Amino acid sequence: MKRRAMRTRTRLKKLAGGTPRLSVFRSNKYIYAQVIDDTKGATLVQASSLEKGAGIKVAGNAEAAKKVGKLVAERAKKAGIKVVVFDRGGYIYHGRVKALAEAARDSGLKF
């Protein structure tokens, strides 16, 4: 899993050329998303299904992933970030990862 994630991340860094990266981590219970500036090595904005104010009842389903995607997109827009590169972290683009990505796109992030 780590090797697959690193292969994807390396390819994205070459392709992006300074564009922030929307990284997704999915555990069995929760889902996390963060926008990272790889040139500085810093997280710009983040959101997760653990947050109290997000209005998430069950944290490990596609509905929670949609709310996290919407939340991270709104925070990125407030920070002045409009374009990102999507890093699925080695997970297949299906289910919760896909739901998060589509919600972020619908909320205004471009990738």
Image (cartoon, helix red, strand yellow):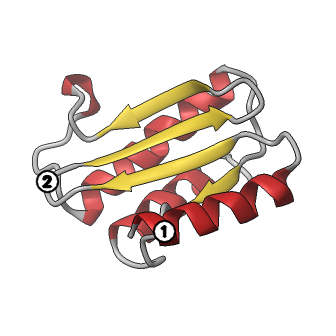
Q: Nearer the viewer, residue 13 or 107?
A: 13
Q: Position of residue 45 (x, y in %)?
A: 54, 26
Q: Position of residue 5 (x, y in %)?
A: 50, 64
Question: Is 48 situated above or below 107?
Answer: above
Q: Which residue is mark 1?
A: 3
The N terminus lies in quadrant: bottom left
Name the residue type under label 2.
Lys
Q: Is residue 12 left or right of residue 45?
A: right
Q: Earlier in the sequence, mark 2 or mark 1?
A: 1
Q: Position of residue 31 (x, y in %)?
A: 30, 50
Residue at 21% in and 49% down: 30
Question: Is 86 situated above or below 67?
Answer: below
Residue at 85% in and 39% down: 18
Q: Position of residue 35 (x, y in %)?
A: 59, 37
> Disc 1 on helix, strand or loop?
helix
Crowd around label 2: few <14 · some 14–19 · many ≥20 (10 Å): few
The C terminus lies in quadrant: bottom right
Residue 24 seen in render: yes
Q: Which residue is mark 2?
A: 29
Q: Is residue 81 left or right of residue 22?
A: right
Q: Residue furthest front?
A: 3
> Looking at the rendering, which quadrant does residue 78 occupy?
top right
Crowd around label 1: few <14 · some 14–19 · many ≥20 (10 Å): few
> Disc 2 on helix, strand or loop?
loop
